[in-house]
Amino acid sequence: MELSRQRIDTVQLGTLMLLSVITELAINMVNLDFVYHFRTMFNMPAGLIGIAVGLAAISYCIACIALASFYERHRPRNVILVGLIGLVVVMLLIAWCTSLPLIWPLLVLYGFAQSMIWPSIEAWLSRGKEGKPLNQAISKFNFSWSLGAGIAPYVCTLLVERNTKLPFFTAAALFLSISIFLFVASIIVPQIRTFDSEKVYVGKAAMQDRSTILRYFCWVGVFVGYVALTGVQTVFPLYAGEVLGWTESTTGILLLIRGIVSCAVFMLLGQTEFWHFKFRYIILSQMAIAGLLLVFNGVTSFGLLIVFFFLLGIFYAFLYVESIFHGASGSVNRSRRMVIHEVVLNIGIIVGGALGGDFYDRFDYPSMMLIFSAILAIVCMVQLVIFLLKRKKKV
């Protein structure tokens, strides 16, 4: 029996949602495990761990930019499958690797394989959509990957307490499972397999670019937001274990709270439109994170840290959704816009990981939070001045 167009769209979206939740679960589990595994296996200092995490992100950014046109010429399903199989291989090699010099090229391959997945998924699910349908599709995507990201820290810390290699093996199994699912789904629903490449689609579509200038402020916001978030998430597990004396699973609970809250906010934003094309919400979400880092600086109470990570999850979700929505809205080539979104936030990961580790080694965790708060505040003031000057010129 031939499936209707609506049924096909539903199956495709469901496939992409499942792909997103499993892939992000595995990736976030691995990224957190880098902190524990590299410390245990190679006795890396915090600064070097930050550089290691940043190296994978650098590789991801370079591959996204350098190979964007190559990926655009191929069907998303094929590109994603190759990336997933590549991640399976890399995870197994990292788990078995006992040589520090060999870890670096493996981290480069790890970032390279990821570059085949996220821009392809984001361009695929946003294609041909604007306004409310675009917001709803992005919301479901954000809910999916953030659900995986929210669960990942707790799952990772439970596995790490047994062996730091276990998260790598678990991630490899997850990547393999979802690649098999995608392959089978594309056989059952041929439209998944034959979904046009971005280059073919743009060539057929007669569209006029109606992009919003607000996307630039959103990209700045997601960059500085990820700098602060990565700095906190890279260093906090070390600080909690070495200074506060907490177990890995206790730390995992706090990171789980942040992830679950972000997941819920993604769903809420997908059902609302009050924040669409509004500069005030873009700048307020950035200022809120700066305020959180300042107010909760030096807090060691588990209860207060629950509040901190709860609020951090809310405003982090705002930054991410604002970036992906305003970047995609009105654009013709969604693949390139998603590459920009991914590159910007991953540069934030690189900078945040490196600076966070370095500040922790040089000073301490509270000082690191103060520095990130100051950076965010300065960036917010610059953006506000630019926006007011542009609005004044229009008047």
Image (tube, helix red, strand yellow):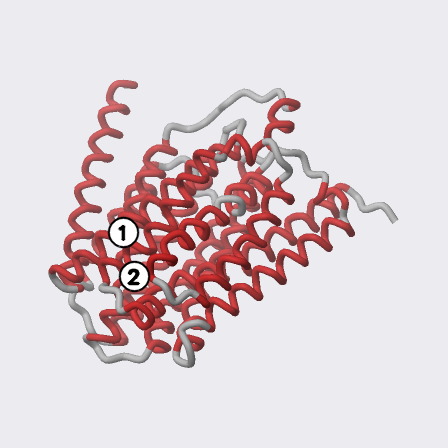
Mark 1 → mark 2, Cα distance in angstroms: 8 Å
Q: Pointer 2: residues within 10 angstroms few (<14), some, or many (20+)? A: many
The image shows residue 360 at horizontal and vertical percentages of: 18, 61
Determine the residue positioned at 62% across, 35% down: 74
Q: Quadrant of residue 310?
A: bottom left
Instruction: Work out whether 264 lies above or below 12.
Output: below
Determine the residue positioned at 59% across, 43% down: 79
Q: Is residue 322 visible?
A: no
Residue underneath mark 2: 234
The image shows residue 78 at horizontal and vertical percentages of: 64, 43
Instruction: Work out whether 131 lies above or below 308.
Output: above
Q: Quadrant where the C terminus lies?
A: top left
In the rendered structure, the answer to whether residue 93 lies left or right of residue 102 reads right
Secondary structure category for the residue under label 1 = helix
The image shows residue 234 at horizontal and vertical percentages of: 29, 61
Instruction: Work out whether 314 lies above or below 205.
Output: below
In the rendered structure, the answer to whether residue 295 lies left or right of residue 42 reads left
In the rendered structure, the answer to whether residue 337 lies left or right of residue 180 reads left
Determine the residue positioned at 72% across, 49% down: 186
Q: Please name the amino acid that badge 1 sits on.
A: Gly
